[in-house]
Every structure is written in C-alpha cells, then in structure tokens.
Amino acid sequence: MHKTIAIICNKEWEFGAFTDALNSSIINQDSRLKNKNVKNKTLNRETICINMKYIDVKIEMFCLQDYIKKDYFETNSKQKFKVLNKIFKNDFDLTISIGTGTSNYSDICNGSVLIGGHTCIYNPYKNKSKNNLILNDDCINIIKSSTIERLKIDDEKCELILNNILQCPNVGGKRKCFKVSKSIVGLSVINIINFDDYSWADFDAINVFNEYNKNLEELSLDTTHGLVRLVTNKEFLFINGITNRLGKYKMDFEPSFYTQGYVAAYNCGTVFNHLLQYLVELI
C-alpha cells in the first residue's frame, strides 16, 4: 500500500501560489515528483483535490476554501473544522499544513518561512456565538508532534533554501529567515472574521499563551494549523509563510494584499520543493 501525504492549504490564493512554486522551472525540483503540471487554482478551479506521486508516495493537496459553502465567510473556523473532519475520515501518513501569518520574531522580513510541528489554539472572543468554533478551553495545551524532532536538514540545504525564498513587497524586518525548529509553536487564533481584530487578537493570544506555557518564546501565528493538527493522529508539520509583522496587518498586508500574500505562500511551495526528499523519509 502506498504511503500518503496530505497538503492542506487554507485559502485559494495560498493554494494558487503554492502550486505555482511546484510548477516553477527555476526552482531546483526533484524529477521524481510526478504529475507536476498542477493548475493555478487562483485562476482555474476545476478540481478540489490535486494528486501527485513521488517515488511510491501518494501526495494529495486540498484547499479548504473550496469546500466551504458560499454562504459562509472563507475564514469561518467552525466551517473549516467541519471540512477537515470530512477530509480526514481516512487519516494520512503525513499531513503538512500550509498557510500564511505572522510571528513574534521582531526582526525577520516578510516572506520568511517557519516550519514547526507543535500547535496550540486560541479563541480571542469571550461570547459563545453559534457561528464560532467553541473548544474546551480558550487556550488549549500544546499538542506536540514528534515529526519535527526527526526532521533534520543540513546547513547547506538550509542556505540554499534561504537564498531562494523571496522578500515580500512590504519588507517589514531586516533579515530574511528560513527556520525549522522543534521550539517553534504554531499558535492558531481562530474565529477571526473581521480582519481589523488582528490588531489586538494576536497580542491577546500571545499573552494568554505565555501564561499557560512558560519559557516558550518562538511563535508562528496563523488561523488554521492548529485545527489541522486536531484531526490527525499521525505525522504532522506546518509550513508558515510570514506576510506581516506582529500587529502590522493593515500596514504590511492590506496595501498590497495579493502580492504580499502570494510571495509568502509561494515561498512555502519553494520550501516544500526543496524538502520533499526529507519529508518522504519521515514516513
């Protein structure tokens, strides 16, 4: 039986940029990745699942936004969680959650890429709205992933990846960063529909997280990685492309929304291309 890898992207523009990177003839691709002629879903939405094959490993790519009913907002966490439970009726050997967001690194530039495995979820809203995803705790305990402990990448490969990822139009920090670390925790801030709430919700999440979890300082913030982690009991990683500095969503992201987000998601695809051999070895 083939081993299986699931790639879960949140939004269609993230999926489109990620698949563009898979198609790139410039990036040093592994010729063993078959069926690479995936279409850019930003422009063409003919299928909601793309299948690829790498040696004897089956790779399935999903875009959550494709599954969410049109009468719901695309970032609705409750709907995303329902979709994920349907996708994961049959679990995958390795799940990789692809997304974009921010981090608590103060000096890295937008376009940087962080890879981790441990996740945590925070709901910034105290009201129990029927439209919100309600979990047992406002800030649940960290769900750890042993996968990140086993992902070892040599310095030469890290340097190659760092040289190939792009800076976003609104640069933000001073240094470009590619980092794979078991010390990075993916903190998913859920139920965000009004993007203006990012200005306070991310800070609120970090403050509450630090009360629960001492001596953990490296955080990668998004809206989805933690939800993906909840539905799989097997190998798990997340790849997060940085679109904006912490608390600077309106300043960094909104002025050039498409290009800013596109570059960050494209960089996630670049990283995946370079690490595919390493990822397959995990299963």
Image: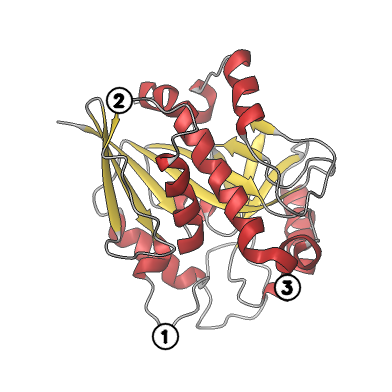
Three-letter amino acid code of the residue under disc 2: Arg
Three-letter amino acid code of the residue under disc 1: Asp
- 22 is higher (above) or lower (below) than 256: above
- Crowding at label 2, few (<14), some or many (≥20) Cα neighbours within 10 Å? few
SS at circle 1: loop
Which of the two residues, 208 or 20, is positioned nearer the viewer here?
Answer: 20
Q: Which residue is mark 1?
A: 71
Q: Is residue 182 visible?
A: no
Image marks 2 and 3: residues in contact by CB distance under 8 Å: no
The numbered dot on residue 197 is: 3
- 100 is higher (above) or lower (below) than 250: above
Q: Quadrant of the C terminus?
A: top left
**Residue sticking out furthest to the front:** 25
Looking at the image, is mark 2 or mark 3 earlier in the sequence? 2
The part of the image, by quadrant, that contains residue 113 is top right
Question: What colour scheme was applied to this rendering of the protein?
Answer: secondary structure
Q: Which residue is mark 2?
A: 32
* CA–CA distance in space, label 3 to label 1: 22 Å
Which of the two residues, 95 or 173, is positioned nearer the viewer here?
Answer: 173
Q: Residue at x 73, y 47 (%)?
A: 110
Three-letter amino acid code of the residue under disc 3: Asp
SS at circle 3: helix
Q: Is residue 212 visible?
A: yes
- 227 is higher (above) or lower (below) than 229: below
Q: Quadrant of the N terminus?
A: top left
Residue 212's x, y, as percent? 72, 49
Looking at the image, is mark 1 or mark 2 earlier in the sequence? 2
**Residue sticking out furthest to the left:** 1
